[in-house]
Image (cartoon, rainbow, N blue to C red):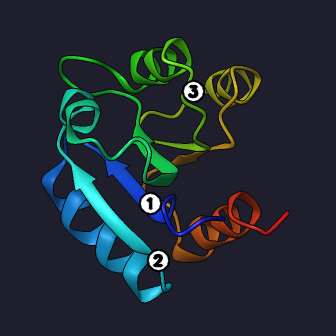
Amino acid sequence: MTAKRSVIAVVDDDESVRESLPDLLREFGFSARAFASAEEFLSSGCIDEACCLILDIAMPGMSGLELQRELVRRGKTVPIVFITAHTDEELRPRLIEQGAVECLSKPFSDTALLDVLRIVLRPG
C-alpha cells in the first residue's frame, strides 16, 4: 500500500458512528476520516487517499449502494466494508456479489471489524 492510499474513510449519517468509529480505527493504528454523507465523501477529494471505505447502506440522499455504483462508474476501486443496522439475510451475499468485501451488522464487535480490515489491507 502506498502512503497516498492510507486513510480509512467512514461514511455514515449517524453522528455517534462518525465519532466513535474513527477513534476505534486510530486505536487500531489506522488513519481515518469521517463523512456525514456519500455526497460529502465524493466532494472531499478523499477518494484517492482511501485504502478502504466503511460505508453505511441506508443514508439520506445517496445511499451506500448508490455510492458504490458511482465509484465504479468513475473507475475508482476501493475496498468497501458495508455496515448496516438492518438485518436482511439476502443482503450480505448480494453485496459481496456486487464487489463489497464484507457487510457487518450494527452493532458489530471491534474484533469483527479488525478481522475484516486485516483481510482488506494485507500486503500483496
In this view, the mark in front (3 or 2): 2
Q: Where is 70 relative to 116, above or below? A: above
Asked whether the residues under the numbered discs 1 and 3 touch, taking CB atoms below 8 Å apart as contact, a structural biologist would say no
Q: Is residue 123 left or right of residue 22?
A: right
Residue identified by numbered label 3: 88
Q: Residue 59: where, in percent of width, then height?
A: 25, 27
Q: Residues within 10 Å of mark 1 (few under 14, many from 20)?
A: many
- x and y percent of residue 6 in the render? 49, 65
Residue hosting label 2: 30
Q: In the rendered view, would you say 124 is above or below 58?
A: below
Q: Position of residue 113 (x, y in %)?
A: 57, 65
Earlier in the chain: of badge 3 and badge 2, it is 2
Q: Secondary structure at mark 3?
A: loop
Tell me which residue sits at (71%, 70%) in the image. Answer: 118
Q: Is residue 123 left or right of residue 71?
A: right
Which residue type does callout 1 highlight?
Answer: Ile
> Position of 82 compared to 99: left or right?
left
Could you tell me which residue is drawn at 52 percent across and 34 percent down?
Answer: 87
Residue appearing at x 57%, y 27% in the figure: 88
Asked if residue 85 can be seen in this view, the reply is no
Residue pointed to by mark 1: 8
Q: Earlier in the sequence, mark 1 or mark 2?
A: 1
Residue type, mark 2 in image: Phe
